[in-house]
Amino acid sequence: MENLSDKAAQNLAAVREKKPLIHNITNYVVMNYTANALLAMGASPVMAHAVSEVEEMVSIAGALVLNIGTLAEDWIASMIKAGQKASELGTPIILDPVGSGATSLRTNSVTRIIRETSLSVIRGNPSEILSLRHNESKTKGVDAVHSVNEAGATAKKIAEELNTTIAITGPADFITNGERVIHVSNGHPLMARVTGTGCTATVIIAAFSAVDDDPVSAAATGLAFFGLAGEAAGQKASGPGSFMIEMLNALYEITPEALKAGCKIREE
């Protein structure tokens, strides 16, 4: 069995060496923070949404993030166009189905993206992941109303059916491609008290996917890195505001050696 602690360290070192360009078609709420998170960890972010440039931009990117948090019809067209070009090139695509299950626009858009592109990883909270298979699964806005344990069995089926990797984030993270199952238990309670932590987890998975051609290990090691950064930030922060700043500092400061020693990854 692969040593995922070693792999986490290797992936972080590779990101800092190669500085992959991560193309984000993401939401207004998190654009600034996720760009800063990518810069802090050593990657290079670009936020490009115009339908007339997404194919050109994704052609030079190491990975593509599709995040439906503030969705509009023209953004859907851009996501599909970028996703199809990335699929053609074999560039990893990471989908963040923010609020899927809350409205038909979100749920139907996610279904279309899944159908028309080749996704490497789908990263969501338990309710968002359940909505991919159960139309009756509802979210509370963009917040989860289900637990990771409730969604785990369904995630395995979804991953197998869609030939992709599912990453469910929560107090403990669950990653599966339908065969392998990995649990990541790094993190801090303050991560749930600020907006955009899930979106940030997604872009970190994208950065690791740009240097690791195994979506399962890229997702698991990326989430371990992000969770460890949360732990480090929580030790210094006095509340949600300072936590956000300390998180960026931690993403910058954590070394590959510290990640290897501190990541909490367990494969079934």
Image: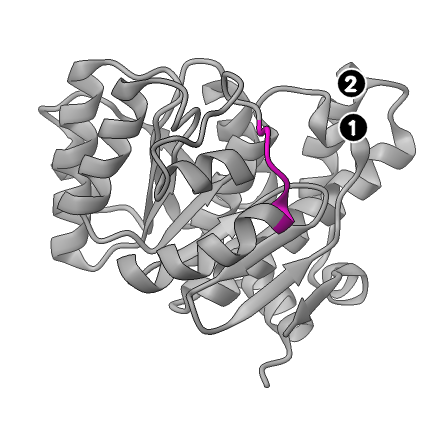
Outermost residue to the bottom = 1
Q: At 80% from the left edge and 66% from the top edge, which residue is drawn?
A: 261
Mark 2 Cα shell of 10 Å, populated few (<14), some (14-19), many (≥20)? some
Cβ atoms at labels 1 and 2 below 8 Å apart: yes
For the point 41% across and 69% down, the residue is: 214
Residue type, label 1: Leu
Identified by mark 2, the residue type is Pro
The residue stretch that appears in magenta: 144-149
* Quarter of the image where one finds residue 79: top left
Q: Is residue 203 left or right of residue 170?
A: left
* N-terminal-most mark, 1 or 2: 1
Assign the magenta stretch its main secondary structure.
loop
Which residue is tagged 2? 240
Q: Distance of mark 1 from mark 2, alpha carbons?
A: 6 Å
Residue 46 visible to the viewer: yes
Q: Which mark is residue 190?
A: 1
Whole-percent x, y for residue 188 in the image: 79, 38
Instruction: Say which of 243 and 122 sits in front.
Output: 122
